[in-house]
Image (cartoon, coloured by chain):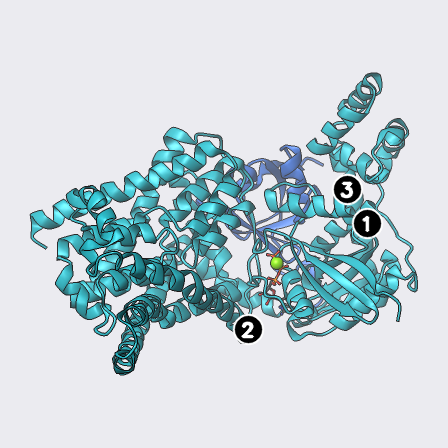
């Protein structure tokens, strides 16, 4: 399978990505991990309009600067119109 | 009865999960509560008694993990490691359990027994999240207690759980997160190498975990304690396994996932919808920024539109009281009469008339904090904060500065980089606090009459402009540095809780009344005395002579010596400015409003207000600034900066006013 990796900052509003890796120091990686952002987690970009990004991951909304979000590599997920997996039935 | 048992309990948890709410209920104290992450930045102790146990409980700053990424996290981590509390109560947000458990996975390694307080059950339920408490308890092997802290639900059980755990009455068999299997060998290897060299107070498993994570402090510590050849081996092992930090993180995530799978089910969305809808508008720059400005505008209009007339009314009441009491004092000596009418009533009494203005302003701020708007404001302000060399998070402490500069300076601890923290602290005094705003409102209304509002607005704008320019210059020329990370959680909005708001407002007002009744009262009396001895008129008094000395200083700014004394007195507390004007101009029965227009020209009043708004902050602020900045260099820098800016601006304002014939 070939996967296209993008920096998180390249996702547009409403798009989802699966985090592959984070290139950053000890501090950044552990802070992100403790807020629920780590390799393997899925994030939705709620806002990406020039300023900092606003992410949604597991029910938590996190604002993250442009610099940091270009260090997070994700693979873009196809947007499904039906319910998202972690919500179960509606 | 035998002596009471004593127990040290630490309240830990991620930011904004309700630790201080729990603390306040248990101890009856009043820590700052609001709906944004990072309010508590210092640890705070309280005491209470449960059964036969005297409990000392410590409210810790919120920490996402134990990595000590920023100052307030270090406070929490050091406390847990060094003080080794009898029990740690970990408060978690039931509506975001996964994230909350991350901290638990680290905390469990530290050795102190942990009780899990599952807070915000109400929020979780609204979102359709069901947590099977028994299952969670079984999985984690520690006591788990559901809570709704704001409604005081579950706190009794939480405390009795903690106490019985210490007494050994509850079962406690931990399931600990493991490092991911491919790194198990490295872990064991490291453990073998370092275990005999670690100082007693540090649990071995925790140290090895932190070592693999690459925690700088733990690395330093081991470098110190390990013999050189062993340290080299450890170092090369770590180098060979560069990805070991991820292995640790992955181990924790697996463990959390198991815990969640065992205990949580979710089936519908509730409150999130509200948050999403509001955020659609409030975090979008095109709407968000005008809305923020609009909200701030409304807050100020409300405060002064409603507060100023009420203040005038109070002033009238106080003056009437002075007139009423005056005849009774004729029989007493002129001294007593002077001290009471001009010192106490004219000084401290005038300051008390600020009450309505402060009440409205504090209520508005507490409301914005409690609904969860603050973090959104910080988010949309990010791009502007970059202009002054900071980012969005610095907006939070700076905004607090409108209430009072002291918590604002302390609040700068949430800023991760040292450079940005110092810059934030340097800029905080430019934010006019309520005390300064109240002085401004009163003097402007008195001297400028109907144009008072325009003058007030312009001066507030001037302060913000000065903040911007100072920020730009300082960050470009003095505090240069690289970009710093910006990571901030935006909490869910929630309905404002009237009780929380009332408590916050009441505490602030109480502090104000106390200040008026002690420091300001004392100062008013003191100033009255030194302006009445040895001669009978103020010109022949001690203060008058000193005034002659400093008079030349104010000359170019159009300030007479009384105004300068009032400015200097503002160092004690900003409200003091009014108390001093009241005493020095002897306004006792007439009220400042009626006296000031006769003694201050428009140009002088303008210059006076400009200097007052930008002057060196009050003593309390200065003290925390020194404490938080640490270095004398930056501290003195800030002093000189404020001095130059305030006098420079006063000078320009005065000359301009004369030129334009205002
Ligand atoms: N709905 C609901 N809200 C709660 C509950 N407990 C606390 N809150 C609210 O959550 C917000 C945060 O509470 P705090 O007590 O200030 O949180 P904290 O953990 O001390 O926060 P920091 O000091 O910033 O780390 C406040 O707005 C509280 O009113 C609860 O059980 N239910
Ligand atoms: Mg708190």
Name the subunit of mark 3.
Answer: B
**What residue sits right under mark 3 in the picture?**
B250
CB at mark 2 closer than 8 A to ligand 1? yes
The chain ID associated with circle 1 is: B
Q: Earlier in the sequence, mark 3 or mark 2?
A: 3
Q: Is residue B74 left or right of residue B590?
A: right
The mark that comes first in sequence, 1 or 2, is: 1
Q: Nearer the viewer, mark 3 or mark 1?
A: 1
In the visual, does B544 lie left or right of B503?
Answer: left
Q: What residue does disc 1 label? A: B108
The answer for which chain carries disc 2 is B
Q: Quadrant of the N terminus of chain B?
A: bottom right
Distance between the Cα atoms at labels 1 and 2?
Answer: 34 Å
Q: Which mark is residue B497?
A: 2
Determine crowd level at label 2: few under 14, some 14-19, many 20+ residues with C-alpha closer than 10 A: some
Tint of chain B: cyan
Give the x, y percent position of residue B638: 39, 38
Chain A drawn in what color? blue
Mark 3 and mark 2: Cα distance apart in space: 39 Å
Query: In terms of depth relative to the viewer, which is nearer, B635 or B469?
Result: B635
Q: CA distance from mark 3 to mark 1?
A: 17 Å
Provide the secondary structure element on which disc 3 rests: helix
């Amino acid at each position: 399978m070939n996967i296209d990796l993008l920096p998180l900052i390249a996702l547009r509003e409403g798009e989802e990505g699966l985090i592959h890796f984070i290139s950053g120091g000890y501090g950044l990686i552990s802070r992100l991990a403790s807020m629920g952002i780590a390799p393997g987690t899925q994030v939705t970009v709620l806002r990406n309009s020039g300023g900092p990004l606003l992410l949604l991951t597991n029910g938590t909304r996190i604002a993250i600067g442009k610099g940091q979000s270009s260090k997070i590599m994700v693979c873009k997920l196809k947007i499904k119109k039906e319910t998202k997996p972690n919500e179960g039935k509606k | 009865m035998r002596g009471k048992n004593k127990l040290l309990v630490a309240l830990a948890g991620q930011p904004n999960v309700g630790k201080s709410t729990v603390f306040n209920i248990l101890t009856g104290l009043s820590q700052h509560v609001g709906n944004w992450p990072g309010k508590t930045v210092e640890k705070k102790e309280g005491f209470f008694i449960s059964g036969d146990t005297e409990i000392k409980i410590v409210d810790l700053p919120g920490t996402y993990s134990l990595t000590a990424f920023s100052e307030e996290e270090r406070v929490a981590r050091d406390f847990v490691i060094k003080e080794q509390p009898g029990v740690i109560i970990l408060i978690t947000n039931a509506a975001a359990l996964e994230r909350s458990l991350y901290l638990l996975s680290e905390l469990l390694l530290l050795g102190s027994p942990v009780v899990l307080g599952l807070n915000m059950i109400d929020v979780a339920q609204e979102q359709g999240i069901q947590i099977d408490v028994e299952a969670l308890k079984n999985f984690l092997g520690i006591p788990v207690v559901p809570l709704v802290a704001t409604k005081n639900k579950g706190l009794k059980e939480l405390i009795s759980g903690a106490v019985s755990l210490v007494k050994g009455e509850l079962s406690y068999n931990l399931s600990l997160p493991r490092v991911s299997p491919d790194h198990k060998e490295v872990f064991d290897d490291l453990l073998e190498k370092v275990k005999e060299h670690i100082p007693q107070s540090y649990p071995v498993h925790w140290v090895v975990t932190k070592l693999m994570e690459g925690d700088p402090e733990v690395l330093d510590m081991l470098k110190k304690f390990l013999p050189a050849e062993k340290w080299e081996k450890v170092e090369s092992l770590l180098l060979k396994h560069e990805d070991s930090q991820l292995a640790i993180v992955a181990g924790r995530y697996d463990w959390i996932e198991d815990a969640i799978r065992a205990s949580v089910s979710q089936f519908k969305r509730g409150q999130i919808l509200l948050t999403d809808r509001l955020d659609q508008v409030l975090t979008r720059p095109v709407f968000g920024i005008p809305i923020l400005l609009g909200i701030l505008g409304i807050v100020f209009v409300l405060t002064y539109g409603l507060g100023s007339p009420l203040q005038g009314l109070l002033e009238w009441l106080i003056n009437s009281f002075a007139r009423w009491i005056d005849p009774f004092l004729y029989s007493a000596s002129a001294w007593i009469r002077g001290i009471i009418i001009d010192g106490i009533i004219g000084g401290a009494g005038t300051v008390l008339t600020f009450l309505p203005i402060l009440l409205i302003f504090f209520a508005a701020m507490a409301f914005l904090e409690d609904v969860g708007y603050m973090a959104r404001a910080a988010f949309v302000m990010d791009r502007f904060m970059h202009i002054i060399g900071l980012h969005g998070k610095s907006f939070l402490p700076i905004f607090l500065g409108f209430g009072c500069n002291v918590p604002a300076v302390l609040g700068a601890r949430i800023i991760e980089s040292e450079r940005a923290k110092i810059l934030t602290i340097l800029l905080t005094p430019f934010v006019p606090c309520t005390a300064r705003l109240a002085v401004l409102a009163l003097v402007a209304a008195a001297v400028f009459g109907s144009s008072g509002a325009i003058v007030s607005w312009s001066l507030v704008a001037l302060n913000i402009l000065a903040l911007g320019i100072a920020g730009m210059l300082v960050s470009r020329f003095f505090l240069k540095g690289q970009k710093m990370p910006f990571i901030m959680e935006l909490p869910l909005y929630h309905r404002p809780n009237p009780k929380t708001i009332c408590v916050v407002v009441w505490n602030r007002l109480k502090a104000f009344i106390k200040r008026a009744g002690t420091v300001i009262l004392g100062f008013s009396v003191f100033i009255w005395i030194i302006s009445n001895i040895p001669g009978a008129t103020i010109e022949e008094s001690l203060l008058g002579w000193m005034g002659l000395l400093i008079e030349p200083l104010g000359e170019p700014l159009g300030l007479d010596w009384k105004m300068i004394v009032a400015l200097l007195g503002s160092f004690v507390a900003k409200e003091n400015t009014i108390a001093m004007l009241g005493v020095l101009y002897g306004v006792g029965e007439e009220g400042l409003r009626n006296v000031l227009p006769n003694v201050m020209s428009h140009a002088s009043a303008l210059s006076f207000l400009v200097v007052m708004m930008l002057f060196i902050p009050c003593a309390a602020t200065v003290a925390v600034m020194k404490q938080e900045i640490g270095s004398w260099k930056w501290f003195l820098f800030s002093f000189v900066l404020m001095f130059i800016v305030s006098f420079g601006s006063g000078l320009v304002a005065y000359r301009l006013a004369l030129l334009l014939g205002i």
